[in-house]
Amino acid sequence: MLSKDRANFGSKIGIILASAGSAVGLGNIWRFPCEVGSNGGAAFILIYLLCITFLGIPVMVSEFLIGRHSRANTASAYQILAPGTHWKWLGLMGVVAAFLILSYYAVVAGWTLEYTFASAADRFSGEKDFTGFFNNFVSNPWKPAACMALFLLLTHIVIVRGVKEGIEKFSKIMMPMLLLIICMLVICSFSMPGSIEGLTFLLKPDFSKVTTKVVLSAMGQAFFSLSLGMGCLCTYASYFSDEANLMKTAASVASIDTLVAIMAGFIIFPAVYSVQGLSPDAGPGLVFVTLPNVFRIAFGNVPWLGYIFSLMFYVLLVLAALTSTISLHEVSTAYIHESYGISRKQAARIVTGICIFLGIFCSLSFGILSDTTWMGMTVFDLFDFVTAKLIMPLGGMLICIFTGWYLDRRLVQAEVTNRGRLRLPFFGIYIFILRYVAPLAIGIIFVNELLK
Ligand code: TRP
């Protein structure tokens, strides 16, 4: 029913770039360096790499096969593969998560817009107090909310153009731009005096820093960064061609995502270490407070270089965030469009409207709503907690159980091998991970996080 006249991505490279666009985002450039900084550097990165390889890629392949086999949005996918069962709630949970993540993610994405405007207008050059600048901005009742709404409108414009003309076309333009900017920034950062110390922090593991908390954070970060656990990549996979090699695509997406995260580390830490008195564990303020300081101090003598460096960096953040908000938007738009028979345009309007509404509360939680809390969490923190700590791990675990135990093994094998046309040496290992390793590992981490 859905599959006949459904849109598809047009090319292999389009498939990889769109999925990598979803994965590469603020999670790589904002959250990853901040997690590395506060979890001790190289040892964290090693554990992160293990999580990506042994948990991330298998879960991603599962999302891909569920999406491509059913050729439907994530909520309908489970109804098609497991009609009349409770598995439909797993899909619906993903749609709810998409609304929540998009609402708070767009707030931080909005900040990146403001920082791009501020860089372009050279407003940073006379500034000394970046903590003040940041706090003033995020606690303002209007400005950050307006930036958030603007960001969602940009996302909306791409979404209404459709899968091929919107998502694929924009990913094909934005991802190469993003990779180019990131390479240029790595070179700039390496050429700063004192950058070696930052590299040592990133490359020399100190295993005495590894605690369960570090392992938990690494796995949470891996899921967030690869956009897993709530049907985002499942929705994209419903637009994949029958020829797409799911395992290879998952491996490429995970590699691009990891590469970008590590390059972001290569940009940020050498720069931070090259300026005396700045600390690498500045937390979420790292890219909004520490970096503008780096730009100011390191390029004190050559202000135009500082200008270019800072503008490129924030444009990079905007591009990365935009390809991710597009993928989150698509989850809900595809669901409303297909399940309620509403036009795609109208469905997109509903999603944008709801997210702007919810986003306003997330935005205000840094200002006038900062005292409105549940269990010590503001609206922003609550959305983050419910999605990143509850829905995503739970979703990831259930996706493994669904593909590993519920689905017919022949169906899984047929889908992953493109009906026997591909040879897959790892298939046995893949199923073993899905059945035993991943659900157990995620389950332990999930319970541990909850009890914290
Ligand atoms: N992966 C993106 C990032 O690294 C964010 C993102 C997009 C996401 N879609 C998602 C996170 C779905 C979790 C689930 O910034």
Image: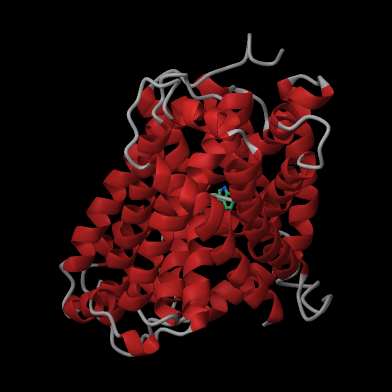
Q: Is residue 185 in view from this perspective? A: yes
Say which of 220 and 193 sits in front: 220
User: Measured from the top left, where is residue 241 in percent x and y?
Assistant: 47, 20
Colour scheme in use: secondary structure
Say which of 382 and 307 sits in front: 382
Please tell me whether residue 172 is drawn above or below residue 115 in the rendered image.
Answer: above
Q: Residue at x 29, y 88 (%)?
A: 276
Q: Residue 79 appears in which quarter of the rendering?
A: top right
Image label count: 0
User: Measured from the top left, where is residue 162 in percent x and y?
Assistant: 59, 22
Q: Is residue 226 in view from this perspective? A: no
Q: Residue at x 59, y 22 (%)?
A: 161
Quarter that holds the C terminus:
bottom right
Give the side of residue 213 with respect to residue 299, left or right: right
User: Measured from the top left, where is residue 321 in percent x and y?
Assistant: 51, 49
User: Measured from the top left, where is residue 428 in percent x and y?
Assistant: 41, 43
Q: Residue at x 39, y 48 (%)?
A: 254
Q: Residue at x 61, y 76 (%)?
A: 135
Give the side of residue 449 with respect to residue 34, left or right: right
Q: Residue 190 appears in which quarter of the rendering?
A: bottom left
Quarter that holds the N terminus:
top right
Say which of 150 and 252 sits in front: 252
